[in-house]
Image: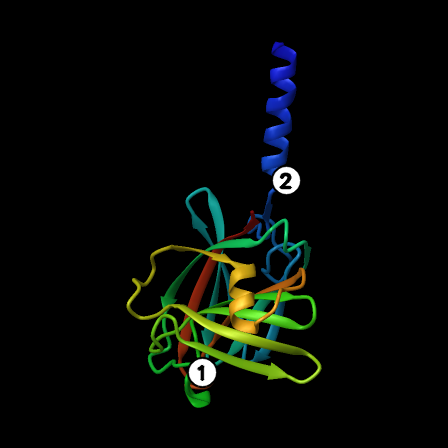
Amino acid sequence: MYRCVLVVALFVASSAAAATIEALDGSKLNSDGSPAEWRIKVKSGTPKVVKMSDGNTTAICLDSVDSSFSLQRDMDLDINKYPFVTFRWRADVLPPKGDLRNSSTDDQAAQMVVAFGGRYAIDYIWDTNAPIGTEGEFSVPLVVTAKILVVANKTNKLKEWMEVTRNLKDDFRRLFGKDPGDISGLRFQVNSQHTSSRAEGCISRITFHD
């Protein structure tokens, strides 16, 4: 009987472990400062990637001065097994005039972009002036169609960690009106080039789970 209980307990523990995927390990860095399995993508300006401590976790900060760049990586996850994403981030410096509602001020301290099969993406952003809940969209023909959702702004405290959990299936269905494909990639981005300012955002954890 005890052996059966132990087997069941091990099976449950194994199943629970399999239901969580850690997508960021800041303790292992590439030569350019990006986390292992991630790469730096520069749109404009000079990237500055800084490693810092978040308790027992290593965080990565993107410090942008009149620039736009990101960390990104490929993923291949079944959306039905991992319908939720939880990320732990913070904004240290907000671009003062940043506001996604105008292309000339479309700068943010932090963006967490989740890509899906079929060339779709959801962009969760920490804006400066756009109200929380503001939505937008952009597309690059034959590359990606993205929906934008403001989940934090200047009303949130700077230099304090915030944990965000989103139901990706629900968000995708509401924003695109159909079911999502599998999770195909991630991007953590900072922008300050439109307003010729400075912005800094940090990320310490990204987890996919059920």
Query: Which residue corresponds to the image point at 67% horizontal and 60% vertical from the top-left?
Result: 182
* Residue at 63% over, 49% down: 81
- Location of mark 2 (residue): 18
Mark 1: amino acid? Asp
Is the C-beta separation of discs 2 and 1 under 8 Å? no
Residue 188 in view here:
no
Would you place residue 64 above or below residue 79 in this image?
below
Q: In the structure shown, which secondary structural element does the residue marked by tag 2 occupy? A: helix
The answer to which of 98 and 35 lies nearer the viewer is: 98
**Residue occupying image coordinates x 58% and y 60%:** 33
Q: Which mark is residue 142?
A: none
Among the two numbered marks 2 and 1 on one chain, the one whose residue lies closer to the N terminus:
2
The residue nearer to you, when weighing 196 against 189, is 189
Location of residue 183 by image quarter: bottom right
- Gap between marks 2 and 1 measured at Cα: 38 Å
Q: Is residue 48 left or right of residue 37?
A: left
> What kind of residue is marked 2?
Ala
Residue 184 locus on image (x, y percent): 67, 62
| Residue at the image position 41 percent from the left and 84 percent from the top | 101
Nearer mark to the viewer, of 2 and 1: 2
Viewer-proximal residue among 165 and 100: 165
Residue closest to the far bottom? 104
Figure check: 181 above or below 46 = above
Estimate how packed mark 1 is, as few (under 14), some (14 to 19) or many (20 or more) residues with alpha carbons within 10 Å: some
Q: Is residue 185 above or below residue 1?
A: below
Q: Which residue is mark 1?
A: 106
Q: Residues within 10 Å of mark 2 (few under 14, many from 20)?
A: few
- Left or right: 198, with 154 as reference point: right
Q: Position of residue 80 (x, y in %)?
A: 63, 52
* Residue 44 spot, x, y in % from top left: 56, 81
- Image position, residue 176 (x, y; %): 57, 73
